[in-house]
């Protein structure tokens, strides 16, 4: 391997790791949003239940 191509490979690996990390963070963020929406809906239903009494 030429030193240049070794550097390119290292860059590609680093880039892929960064992309993987972003996908993971994005997935965690999406899960958090999903959980918060579920909580909000539950609270709204509780509120409607107490208001309709």
Image (spheres, rainbow, N blue to C red):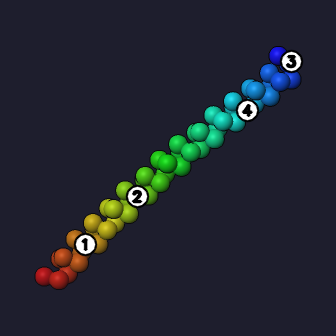
Please identify the quarter of the rendering in which residue 44 is found.
Answer: bottom left
Contact check, label 1 and label 4, Cβ < 8 Å: no
Residue named by callout 1: 45
For disc 2, the marked residue is 34
* Mark-to-mark CA distance, 4 and 3: 15 Å
How many residues crowd mark 1 within 10 Å: few (<14), some (14–19), many (20+)?
few
Between the residue at mark 2 and the residue at mark 1, the CA separation in whole angstroms equals: 17 Å
The answer for how far apart the CA atoms under marks 3 and 1 are is 64 Å
Q: Nearer the viewer, residue 34 or 53?
A: 34
Residue under the point 80% across and 28% down: 8
- Give the residue at the far left of this rendering: 53
Label 2 secondary element: helix
Foreground: disc 2 or disc 3: 3
Query: Which mark is drawn over residue 2?
Result: 3
> Percent from the top left, x then y, of residue 23?
56, 45
Q: Position of residue 53 (x, y in %)?
A: 13, 82
| Tag 3 near tag 1, CB within 8 Å | no
Category of crowding for the residue at label 2, using alpha-carbon neighbours closer than 10 angstroms: few (below 14), some (14–19), many (at least 20): few
Which badge, 4 or 3, is on the more N-terminal residue?
3
């Amino acid at each position: 391997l030429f030193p240049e191509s070794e550097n390119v490979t290292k860059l590609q690996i680093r880039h892929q790791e960064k992309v993987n990390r972003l996908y993971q963070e994005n997935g965690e963020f999406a899960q958090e949003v999903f959980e918060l929406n579920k909580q909000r809906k539950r609270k709204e239903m509780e509120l409607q239940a107490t208001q309709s009494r």
